Structure formats: C-alpha cells, structure tokens
C-alpha cells in the first residue's frame, strides 16, 4: 500500500492530503519506462561489445573452420601445381622430344579463361576476393590437367605408332652368324662373277650351306614369293610399310606365301643357289621408297658392336660378288 502524504495549508492552518494528478503519474511512468529502455539498450550495446552470443560464437567457429579449410586447399593446390609442373617438364623434355612432337607452350598450359565473368556469383561477400582467387586457381589447375591428359593421349598414340614402326623396320641379319660360312660381298662396286666386269652390287651376299634358314628382318606382308624376277631366282619380297621393302634372293625353297603376314625373326625360306648365282648364298637387299639402300645400317637388332664392326669391315672390301 502506497504511503499517504500531506502538506500544511497556511490559510486554513491545517494539514491537507496531497492528491496526485493522473497526468503526473502517467508522466512518471513514461519517464521510468524510457529510462529503463535506454538503460537496457546501453547494457545490450556494451554487452555486445564484450560478450558473444551463442550464434556469434557459432559463426566465429564456422569462419575459423573455413579459414583452416582454405589453407588446406591452398596447400593441396600448391602440391597439385608442383606435380603438374613436373609432369609438364617431363612431357616436353622427354616424351614429346623422344616421339618428335612439338612441345606444348607454357602459356597454353597455364592460361585462364577469357570472355564473360565466370565468378560473378562469388562477388558481394566479405571474402569475395579470396573465393574468386581460389576458384580461378582451381580452374587453371583443372585446365592444366585437361591439356596434360590430351598430351598424354597423343603421346600414347605416338608411342604405339613408334613401337609399330620400330617393329617393322628391317633390323636383324637375315641369316644367323652361326650358320654363315662367310660374308661374301657387300653393297657397292664389286666384280661380277660371270663377266668379271666391275659393276654396282645393290645388296649383301651371305654365304651359307644350302638349306640354311632365312629369317624375316622386320614385321610386314609378303608381297612376292616367286622366281619371276630376272637374276634373283626364287626370291621373297616383304613390304614393311613406311616405304621399306626387304628382298631375299637365290632361295632353295620358301616357307611363306604371297600376302602372308610375318613377324621379325619368322622363318621365311632357305638358302639356295637359284637364278644368277655362282654358289649357295643369300642375296639381301633393302628398298626405301623404291630406292635400293645399303643394308649394313639395318643390323642393330641382333649384332653386338664388335660383330657389327667386323661385318662392316668385310662388307667394305671390294671383292667379287656371288651373283
């Protein structure tokens, strides 16, 4: 119960009860509420400066986690760039060089994307620059991966073609060294055994007993296995592709037929002395783009350095050929 207050009336010489007007009461109530609201606002403002709400704490933790994830992402991108740089260096300096392909320019590997703004959706945020730079970096890395992937696809095709090319090129001696009597005559001017006239000898003569095995010097297709060419007697011609053809003449008999596919080292026939021949031997020729070339350069597949040197010395002697 509120206290009753009185005042002394000098005119009546008596005490009178103080009557509070409603307007004054309302004024006091309003001032109290205003002061309370103002105090509450000041308190909340001060508290917000020094104390975090649960939601703010959650947002701070989320921001810290994002910063940590971004740092980890940056490290992963650094590692990815190091690996891609290493692969690109090997690609240009080893793989593409070996297969005679043009290196990929560095600006092509690392260029970004022009034209429209691809990162507009990330603008307008507190960390927009950070987000945009991260996405740009990721896009460049992804493009590098695409460029490198296409390059390796190209290298794989080149490797397959190179392997096929190396397998088809005549690269071994058509008669084993253990079966040879001697290397009778090489490529160049030699004395004809029948006319005794000095003339150009377009192949190499390997002396061996009749029936000695003869082997295909590279992968290919038998184009001829007949005696229809003057002077060669029974002979075989193998088309190796890439403009290369090998010829094996004066055979005793065949072990292949026309249009048959052969592999390097396959038995294709046997040494004989058919056609224009003085004694059992194999006359061996190589054509490149229909021009006969020196077979001495095509024995790297089965001769040691010493054996090749000895063969080269014998083939250089200007003696008498056997056909």
Image (cartoon, grey):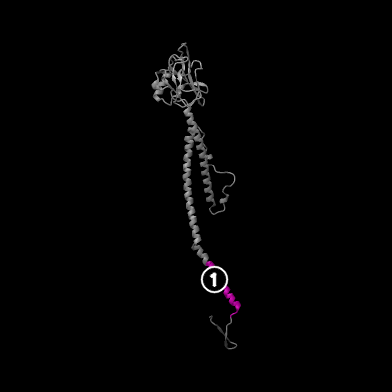
- Residue 271, by quadrant, is top left
Position of residue 32 relative to residue 280, above or below, is below
Q: Is residue 58 above or below residue 257?
A: below
Q: Residue sitting at 48 percent across and 54 percent down?
A: 65
Q: Position of residue 320 (x, y in %)?
A: 44, 14
Q: Residues within 10 Å of mark 1 (few under 14, many from 20)?
A: few
User: Circle 1 — which element?
Assistant: helix
In percent of the image, x 52 and y 67: which residue is there?
Answer: 43
Q: Position of residue 27 (x, y in %)?
A: 59, 75
- Per the image, the residue denoted by label 1 is 36
- Looking at the rendering, the stretch of residues picked out in magenta corresponds to 20-42
- The overriding secondary structure of the stretch rendered in magenta is helix
Magenta stretch holds residue 33: yes
Drawn side of residue 92 relative to residue 120, left or right: left
Residue situated in front as seen by the camera: 22 or 183: 183
Is residue 70 a member of the stretch shown in magenta? no
Percent across and percent down for residue 148 are: 50, 39
Total tally of numbered discs in the picture: 1
Q: Is residue 270 visible?
A: yes
- Looking at the picture, how far across and down is residue 144, in whole percent? 51, 41
Q: Is residue 185 visible?
A: no
Looking at this rendering, what residue extends furthest in the bottom direction?
A: 13
Q: Residue at x 47, y 38 (%)?
A: 89
């Amino acid at each position: 119960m509120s206290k009753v207050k009185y005042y002394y009336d000098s005119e009546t010489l008596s005490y009178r009860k103080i009557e509070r007007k409603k307007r004054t009461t309302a004024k006091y109530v309003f001032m109290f509420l205003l002061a309370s609201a103002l105090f509450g606002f000041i308190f909340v403002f001060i508290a917000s400066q020094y104390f975090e709400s649960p939601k703010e704490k959650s947002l701070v933790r989320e921001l810290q986690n994002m910063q940590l994830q971004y740092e980890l992402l940056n490290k992963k991108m650094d590692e990815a760039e190091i690996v891609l740089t290493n692969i690109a260096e090997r690609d240009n300096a080893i793989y593409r060089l070996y297969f005679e392909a043009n290196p990929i320019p560095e600006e092509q590997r690392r260029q970004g994307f022009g034209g429209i703004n691809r990162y507009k959706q990330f603008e307008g945020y507190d960390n927009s620059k950070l987000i945009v730079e991260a996405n740009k970096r990721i896009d460049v890395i992804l493009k590098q991966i695409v460029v490198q992937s296409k390059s390796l696809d190209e290298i794989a095709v080149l490797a397959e073609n190179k392997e096929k090319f190396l397998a088809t090129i005549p690269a071994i001696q058509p008669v084993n060294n253990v079966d040879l009597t001697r290397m009778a005559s090489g490529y160049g001017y030699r004395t004809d055994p029948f006319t005794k006239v000095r003339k150009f000898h377009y192949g190499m003569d390997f002396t061996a007993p009749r029936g000695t095995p003869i082997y295909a010097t590279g992968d290919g297709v038998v184009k001829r296995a007949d005696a229809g060419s003057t002077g060669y007697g029974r002979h075989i011609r193998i088309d190796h592709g890439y403009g290369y053809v090998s010829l094996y003449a004066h055979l005793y008999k065949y072990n292949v037929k026309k249009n048959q596919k052969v592999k390097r080292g396959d038995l294709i026939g046997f040494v004989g002395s058919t056609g224009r021949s003085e004694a059992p031997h194999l006359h061996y020729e190589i054509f490149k783009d229909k021009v006969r070339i020196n077979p001495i350069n095509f024995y790297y597949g089965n001769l040691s350095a010493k054996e090749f040197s000895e063969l080269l010395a014998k083939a250089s002697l200007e003696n008498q050929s056997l056909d």
